[in-house]
Image (tube, grey):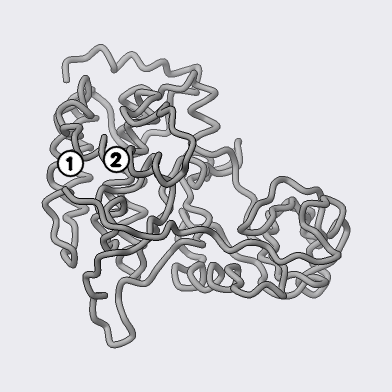
Amino acid sequence: MKYVKRTMCIRTQMASGTDSLSDPAVLANQRVGNSIFTVGYYVTGGSFGSLYIGTNTETGEKVAIKVERADIDKPQLPLEYGFYKTLGNYMIFIPKIHYFGPCKNYSALVMDLLGPSLLKMNQICGGHFGLVTTTKLMIQILNIFEYVHSQGIIYRDVKPDNFLFGQPNTPKWATVHMIDLGFCKRYINEDNRHISYVEGKGVTGTARYISVNNHVGRELSRRDDLEAILYMIIFLHKGQLPWQGLNVADLRERTKQIGIIKMTTSSKELCSNMPIEYENFLELVKKIRFNERPPYRQMMNQFRYVLFRMGITADDNYYDWDQSHQPRHENKRL
């Protein structure tokens, strides 16, 4: 397969100025949302904004506050807020948005404070999820993407950092939530038609998880989100993907080499020592046409059957990190 020449997709850089989001104290104690929310301590930041922990002064509850300079050339936070509005606050796997608006010289997005990410929980479990946990997560995430895609949106940023559990000791603890919608794109145009197939596009997302179509510069659609999900799930289960650890310093060359390894690694090899449904899933996704709706329910039912063969149901809340429920099901014949 021939590689197309392209420009890498790079997140918008923060504008320079006297106020810098690299200084954690810039927004400390600022009030936002009609003074209902107070900005607290700085958590992390980068080219796509910065994250603070804040407080709802009326309820005392902690919230997450994402901020971005208001004067940058291509602001991303208003776009992200628009996607959150489209997906709606009533879906339990989309964090609730409490406020979007100004905060000094910044735009601020106030949302529910969630719990640890899939990556964090994977690290707690020694870098490997058992098949029970892996399969439950696959079902949850496919359910999320069925809904997101039904709203005319593709995600384009699948990675374990972007999926968070609810706060511990709450009813949402075992629920996976999708965050960081900055790379989302509408695949349905204003005239209610699917976007056109295009080649020569740039790479979007994290190279480790993106689809082969993404690597070779093809316009992305629903199928590419699903392919990326499988790569992420295999990483969480096995702790390693065949294209990790390349000794290539140049980002573009490393991304190209990752793509080549993905193309030359068979589904059987990639999904070795996993139930056949994982291999079948990847083979099915690769056959989905650009504008075709994936068979989400069929896919989820196949993974429910994996759990059925292990003697459990998909809706219990036990995972590898729950000490009262060791993954004894792993020994059952798959």
Task: Write down the quadrant of residue 91 in the picture.
Answer: bottom left
Task: Write down the quadrant of residue 31 in the picture.
Answer: bottom right
Label 1 element class: helix
Question: Which residue position is annotated with label 1?
Answer: 281
Rendered position, 125 above or below 176: above
Pinpoint residue 195: horizontal percent, then vertical percent.
Answer: 26, 75
Pinpoint residue 62: horizontal percent, then vertical percent.
Answer: 73, 51
Identify residue type, mark 2. Answer: Leu
In what quadrant of the picture does the C terminus appear? top left
Task: Write down the quadrant of residue 248 in the picture.
Answer: top left
Q: Which mark is residue 230?
A: 2
Pick whichever of labels 1 and 2 is earlier in the sequence. Answer: 2
Q: Are marks 1 and 2 in contact (CB under 8 Å)?
A: yes
Label 2 element class: helix
Q: Judge the density around disc 1: few (<14), some (14-19), many (≥20) Cα neighbours within 10 Å.
A: many
Rendered position, 247 above or below 297: above
| Along the line of sight, the residue nearer the viewer: 226 or 125 | 226
| Along the line of sight, the residue nearer the viewer: 105 or 126 | 105
The count of marks equals 2
Is 196 on the left or on the right of 249, as rendered?
left
Measure the alpha-carbon separation of dots 1 and 2: 8 Å
Image point 23% across, 45% down: which residue?
A: 300
Pinpoint residue 305: horizontal percent, then vertical percent.
Answer: 17, 34
Is 97 on the left or on the right of 195, as rendered?
right
